[in-house]
Image (spheres, rainbow, N blue to C red):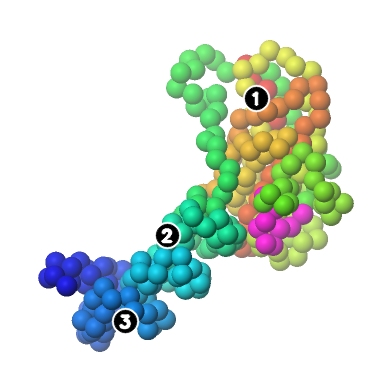
Amino acid sequence: MSKKTVFLLMAMLLAIPLLRADDPAAVARRQAFTRECGEDAAKAAKYLKDKDPEIRRYAIYLYAKANGAKAREVLKAAALDKDLMVRTTAVSALCTLAKKDATLNTFLTKIAADDPELSIRELAGKASWPFKREIKLLRNDPGWDHEILSVKRWQLDDNKWRFITDPGAKGHTEKNQYYAKKVSNSGKWKPIKYGYWENQGFGDYDGIGWYRIRFTMPKKVAHNAVEIQFSGVDESAWVWLNGTYLGCHDIGVAGHNKYFAVDATKEVKFGAENVLTVRVKDTGAAGGIWRPVHVEILK
């Protein structure tokens, strides 16, 4: 192994240590690891569960690089590691493997729902989440230089929401499709109102919950846009209208009280019943659509 390779390896091992980098014992162990293993994955394998996360992380990297798809179980275990960088390394490798092995998407979907770190949720989510759509609102269109007027705005009926928990984070999969206009398990959806779901019979539940509501649009009028507006969802939300994905609001815990809106201009059906579905993720404490949702017709 060249001096340059040794230097780069040591730099990586000392970059974000859990043990202090100025701890002589920690430095000595990492130097010993480097001398013994170099880039030999077979030798590094015995360090996969080392107490030092930086040694553990590089051992996992070498193992995955050498074994490819055969490393999937080791990577899945490492994706649940307590250390952020170890998890990031493992999830990154799993995302690469998932390009050729779609069976890993189920595991990555769970990581995207459960990991406490937003960066890892986004990493896993991009690899496993099948819905892609950027939210584009009329008010943010740089090419629109006209005044925007509200034709009509109203709150969706608090008494018509239905709700179901999704502990396995599988409600969006092909088998379930909770976002579809018609769902096979409609009898299991329970009535719910604006407010936290913990206060409405769902105890201390944290995780994924789905909301559905049917509402009727007025007859078609001259308009330039239709928006569905959320004044408070704790803490993340993914939105569908009539089975079509409209976009998401997922900035982590900080998003629990932030206003956001999605464009539904093309998907909304005037003079007819519409079905709005919202997938909500709560990672701790209270969760749910806790402030009213409005529909607004703009011109």
Contact (CB < 8 A) between labels 1 and 2? no
In the rendering, at what x and y percent does residue 164 appear?
Answer: 77, 54
- The type of residue carrying mark 3 is Lys
| Left or right of 221 in this view: 184 | right
**Label 2 element class:** helix
- Find numbered disc 1 in the image and state the secondary structure of the residue it sits on: loop
Q: Which residue lies at the image location 57% right of the left edge and 18% below the top edge?
A: 148
In magenta segment, residue 166 = yes
Residue sitting farthest toward the right: 187
258 in magenta: no
Q: CA distance from mark 3 to mark 1?
A: 58 Å
* Residue segment shown in magenta: 164-172
Which label sits on residue 266?
Answer: 1
Q: Nearer the viewer, mark 3 or mark 1?
A: 3
The reply to whether discs 2 and 3 touch (Cβ–Cβ < 8 Å) is no
* Residue designated by label 3: 43
